[in-house]
Amino acid sequence: MAGSRFSVRVDGLNQLKRTLRQLKDKDLSKSVREVNKAAAELVKPDAQRGVPQHTRTPKDSKKYRPGKLARSVKVVASANSAAIKAGTASRSPYAGAIHFGYPKRGIKPNRFLYRAMARNSDQVAETYEREISAVLRNKLEN
């Protein structure tokens, strides 16, 4: 999708990432990645429900299968970040046009990913804070 993103900023995250790189602790990096993924997974069901629904009509192409965009919503996570993405270049290249709109074709924007994140941002922040604290506590105790 075009470069704009909705994100949650975490104070001290850059320092945590720097410390992780210095420690070169694979288990800790893996744990942080899992926390990032768990926090983003909270948004995925809401994003899938927010995808515009369309039923197939007799005039539609035989290749058209409703629901492909909803099935393409996925979570991508690393030790540095997590993202929710929709669409792929080969299977649903129209995801950007649906999300951001395409005025020349008369497609109005339907920012389903942004709305899903906005609705769940408090829950994501709480989960992230709780899980990161638990990971760091476990690491410090060992």
Image (cartoon, grey):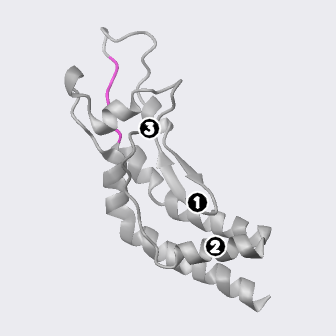
For marks 2 and 3, the one nearer the N-term is 2
Q: Viewer-nearest of labels 3 and 1? A: 1
Q: Which residue is mark 2?
A: 18
Which stretch did the figure color magenta? 51-56
Work out which quarter of the rendered image holds the N terminus and state it: top left
The residue located at (48%, 42%) in the rendering is 73
The residue located at (39%, 44%) in the rendering is 3
Residue 54 belongs to the span the image colors magenta: yes
Query: 117 and 96: which one is in front?
Result: 96
- Side of 94 where 32 appears, left or right: right
Q: Which residue is mark 3?
A: 70
For marks 2 and 1, the one nearer the N-term is 2
The residue located at (48%, 50%) in the rendering is 84
Q: Which residue type carries mark 2?
A: Arg
Q: Which residue is mark 1?
A: 37
SS at mark 3? helix
Query: 22 and 91: which one is in front?
Result: 22
Tell me: residue 54, above or below residue 129.
above
Residue 80 position within the rendered picture, expressed as x and y whole percent measured from the top left = 59, 63
For marks 3 and 1, the one nearer the N-term is 1
- Side of 94 where 109 appears, left or right: left
- Asked if one can make out residue 26 in the rendered structure from this viewpoint, the answer is yes
The residue located at (46%, 13%) in the rendering is 63
Residue 58 image-quadrant placement:
top left
SS at mark 2? helix
Q: Are marks 2 and 3 in contact (CB under 8 Å)?
A: no
